[in-house]
Amino acid sequence: MARLGLVINPVAGLGGAMARKGSDEPDIAARARAEGRAPLAPLRAERALTAFRQACAAEVLAGPLMPEGTRPVGPGDLTHTAEDTRAAVAAMQGEVDLILFAGGDGTARDICAANDGGIPILGIPCGVKMHSGVFARSPERAGQLAAGFLNDARRRTEMVEILDLDEAARRAGRLSARLYTVARTPLDGQGARQNPKAGNTDTVGEVDAALAAYVAGMREDTVYVLGPGATMMALKDRLGGGSLLGVDLAEGGLITARDLDETALMTRMAGRPVRIVLTVVGGQGFVLGRGNQQISARVLRAAGLPPIDVICGPDKLAALNPNELTIDTGDPGLDAELAGYWPVMTGPGRKQVMRVVA
């Protein structure tokens, strides 16, 4: 019988709503507890495992956390560190046919470092950035793809890039993903996995004109929540300058707050008309849920599901495969409410309607 290895990094994604740009800091768990934040990765792993068990009867070996109905593997005394992840993967060598892991790009790197046998791997998206192509687009899709792979006697795979944010570039004020290695993952013919993050392919003149038109139409009485990314940075520059990787606020035609976390956003938005302004992650098509987890389901619901404006050049949209946008707020019910068709501003006076899926 096929066997699945499950690895959960419990601190993955904790830094997102806290505006930490990642969860690699050694005190991130303590910071999260101090703010009353519960780990997100175990819950997202349970969503994936539920979808998996609906389609596959394979035994599940788990470590370093053991959801109900799984068999433990790896170290018994856990500190929930990268060493635990690597020890669990080492213990799974020769024992499982697929490693399903809950984490982000940093976890993917740890998995690869210990996966000496080259066992195929698949990521449940739980991190802040997730630039790598090894991740499914949602926990449910991860479980479904894992089940399909183990149920298929052919067990077909493909090689994908493992990327992570270049920290030196980030400190220098540039947004750049660095290639660390490649890994084998289940072959995906259904669009269940996300593509690796791609560079910005927008035509500068078109996007600049769209941004200028957007600024000209901003209302004085509205709070604008501006997401991260290079396109949004160009918009923020027109409003006095903001943060490249942060979520900022603009009021009255100027940036009034930079790099806010989830709690600060909710405080600053309370009782005010709000608009959310976002761009599209190149190559992946994500609008919510990758690098902007500060704009959480809690924030969106507290603001009354405000209008969401998406600004993106036509070249970047045309390069998406599949040609659709994706949202992953962590709240499946909200994702279902938001899914549908959204207009995307591609130039001055021009919009392109895009299908949005969860």
Image (spheres, rainbow, N blue to C red):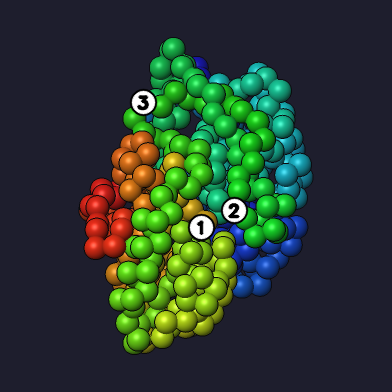
Q: Position of residue 111 (x, y in %)?
A: 66, 35
Name the mark on residue 29. Answer: none
The image quarter in which residue 144 lies:
top left
Q: Callout 1, which amino acid?
A: Ala
Give the mark nearest the N terminus, 3 or 1.
3
Of callouts 2 and 3, the N-terminal one: 2
Image-based side of 87 in relation to 307, left or right: right
Mark 3 residue element: loop
Label annotation for residue 175: 2
The residue that appears at 54% across and 44% down in the rendered structure is: 131
Q: Is residue 150 above or below residue 265?
A: above
How many other residues sit within 10 Å of disc 2, few (<14), some (14-19) or many (≥20)?
some
**Image position of 279 (left or right of 77):** left
Q: Give coordinates of residue 230: x percent, y percent.
A: 51, 57
Residue placed at 55% from the left, 71% from the top? 242
Point out the tag, 2 or 1, that comes first from the N-terminus: 2
What numbered label is drawn on residue 230? 1
Residue hosting label 3: 189
State the separation of the CA atoms marked 2 and 1: 7 Å
Viewer-nearest residue: 258 or 58: 258
Mark yes or no: residue 192 visible: yes
